[in-house]
Amino acid sequence: MRRLVGFALALGLAAPAAMAETEIKFTLDWKFEAPAAPFFIAQDKGYFEAEGLSVTIDSGAGSRESIPRVATGAYDMGFGDVNALIKLMDDQPDLKVKAVMMAYERPPFAVIGRKSQGVTEDPKSLEGKTLGAPPPDAAFGQWPAFVEVAGLDTSGMTIESVGFPVREPMLAQGQVDAIFGFSFSSVINLKAQGVDPDDISLILMGEHGLDLYGNVVMVNTDFAEANPEAVKGFLRALTKGFLDTIADPAASVPHVLERNAVLDEATEIDRITMAVEGSIATPAVKANGFGGVDMDKLAKSIDHLKVSMGVSDTPPAPERIFDASYLPPLEERMIK
């Protein structure tokens, strides 16, 4: 094939455009909802195409579940929770995946309750309550560390295993007092269930001592080694998608609505606005640029993971977890 392309170029003929494209299979962490907008913007506005990429984007089943998809090579790249990634890398040192772009500088890990059921924004109000927890939920995964930093007495608490689809309905119906989830997912979903916003209490773990990172873009290490320029091109394109979303969250929503017609536009605008303000365009990102990490913060976060996720005393080094070499230059990642 290489000889044929060279022969065509020698004759002054252009090789077909498709031959120049690198295909990338990408898995999201969740359904096609507003937080996925940056990825679809990069696709719809031709940012991926301009980098010579043909990108397929599939939905996910949770921010922890997407990691094995990438590690096994079923997907070339993906979006998932960096804390769950660290745990898997600790358990499997040869895991073929690494993080290459930080999207959620402040994780949306939260416990969401109802004031009418005795849950306030004080973590202590959770004592003696019944909490609904989907086992694969990333916020629930941090519960042991949050209990420690918040100084909670769990002896009177009940943790009830629930599925993602019934999590918010159960809280809306009063079957549990609080739930674990992403702030911009569960709060917005509760409002859509008809719960009075003034009755919703949001306990953000990051505001009560649990200083972690959140979701990252990951790459299969074999794919990255074979296609370094494609990975760099993907991140350049995606950076533009995120910066577009930050600049005008409401304008990003139609890119998702095209792919999930059952969504309510006003609800999704609220969701992406909350995600941008709380997790994506944080003060640290505004000061230091989108996509990178503070290696000291990443290293310190691993101490929390030793409590919450059983990470060993010899965890993977921060440089093994996060590889910044594929990111665009800093000036291309600054929020204007």
Image (tube, rainbow, N blue to C red):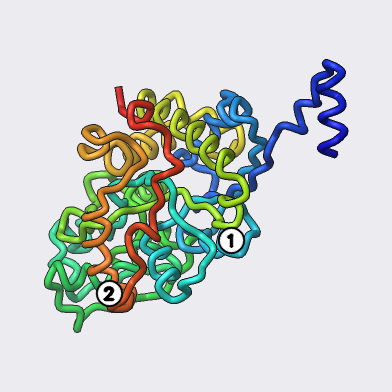
Q: Quadrant of residue 245?
A: top left
Question: Left or right: where does residue 273 sit relative to residue 78?
Answer: left
Marks 2/1: CA–CA distance: 24 Å
**SS for dot 2:** helix
Q: Which residue is mark 2?
A: 306
Of the pair 83 and 200, the residue shown nearer to us: 83
Q: Amino acid at mark 2?
A: Lys
Kindly tell me whether residue 148 is visible in this rendering: yes
Q: Which residue is mark 1?
A: 69
Identify the mark nearer the N-term, 2 or 1. Answer: 1
Q: Amino acid at mark 1?
A: Arg
Question: Left or right: where does residue 194 sit relative to residue 147?
Answer: right
**SS for dot 1:** helix
Residue in view at x 56 percent, y 50 percent: 224
Q: Position of residue 304 (x, y in %)?
A: 24, 68
Q: Tell me if residue 92 comes above or below residue 1 in the rendering.
A: below
Q: Tell me if residue 157 comes above or below residue 230 in the rendering.
A: below
Residue in view at x 60 percent, y 36 percent: 261
Residue in view at x 19 percent, y 68 percent: 126
Of the pair 161 and 296, the residue shown nearer to us: 296
